[in-house]
Each structure stands twice: as C-alpha cells, then as structure tokens.
C-alpha cells in the first residue's frame, strides 16, 4: 500500500461481524458489518478527508473503494478525541479481508496518512 503522506498520530481499532440476516449463501452473498474507532493520539486537531480500502475475498478478487470522508462525514477530531462509525461490505465468499488508509488534514493544510491494518471478514466457525 502506497502512503503518500507522513503518518498521522491516529489509532484505529476495528470490530467486524458476519451479518447472517443480510446474507444469502446460496447466491454467494456474504454480508459483514464493521465498527471503526478512530482516536487522535496527537496534540492538534485533524480532519479525516479521504478513505481508501482494498477489500479481498477468498477467491483473491480485490475491490478498491475510495472517496471523501467516511459514512458521509469528514469529522474533525480534537486531541484525544474519538470518532466511531459503522459500515459494511459484501463478499462472494464466506471469508475475506479489508485494509486501507485514511488521509487526514491538519489546521495548517498539511496532509497525513493513517494506515488501517488488515482485518478479517469471516463467518463464525462451528466446532463439533
């Protein structure tokens, strides 16, 4: 992943869940929800300007998603502040992963990258 800006002092935590009620396995539709918690660990306000995602399924099919902000917002996080949002993704396989980065801007107009480590999208396993 090519990060074109210096790293932002941002902490990112992810929780993902399989959404069985929104999935249709017989049609190869597997829906996953995820919660992202973004924390500004720095000393100055930062505004989330852009997102970039690579979503890959178990067939090695990769979808790239990028755009302004997240869930229709470009939140400004003050020092120590958190922003939490929920979103989702659909795969054609029961397993996959997502990774990417956010681009933040400070009050002086400088841009910073915050990598989002890969996280698993997976249906729960049943142990017999």
Image: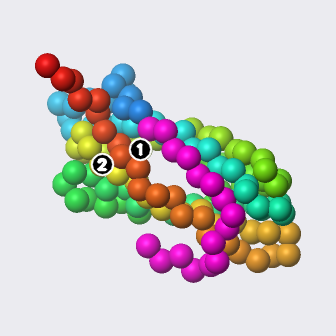
Q: Which residue is mark 2?
A: 96
Residue 36 relative to residue 16: left or right = right
Residue at 69 percent of width and 64 percent of height: 9
Mark 2 or mark 1: whose residue is earlier in sequence: 1
Q: Position of residue 83 (x, y in %)?
A: 70, 45
Mark 2 vs mark 1, foreground winner is 2
**Helix, strand, or loop for circle 2?**
strand
Residue 14 visible in the displayed image: yes
Q: Magenta stretch containing residue 4, yes or no?
A: yes
**What stretch of residues is rendered in magenta?**
1-16
Which is nearer the eye, 4 or 61?
4
Q: Which residue is mark 1?
A: 89
Residue farthest to the top?
Answer: 128
**Helix, strand, or loop for circle 1?**
strand
Q: Is residue 125 above or below residue 119?
A: above
Residue at 73 percent of width and 55 percent of height: 40
Q: Is residue 38 above or below residue 21?
A: below
Q: Position of residue 14 (x, y in %)?
A: 51, 44
Residue 38 relative to residue 62: left or right = right
């Amino acid at each position: 992943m090519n990060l074109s800006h210096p790293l932002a002092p941002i902490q990112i935590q992810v929780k993902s869940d399989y959404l069985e009620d929104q999935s249709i396995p017989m049609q190869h539709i597997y829906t996953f929800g995820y919660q992202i918690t973004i924390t500004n660990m720095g000393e100055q306000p930062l505004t989330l300007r852009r997102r970039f995602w690579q979503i890959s399924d178990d067939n090695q099919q990769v979808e790239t998603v990028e755009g302004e902000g997240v869930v229709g917002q470009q939140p400004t996080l003050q020092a120590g502040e958190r922003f939490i949002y929920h979103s989702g993704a659909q795969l054609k396989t029961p397993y996959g992963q997502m990774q990417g980065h956010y681009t933040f801007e400070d009050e002086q107009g400088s841009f910073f990258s915050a990598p989002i480590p890969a996280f698993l999208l997976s249906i729960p396993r049943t142990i017999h």
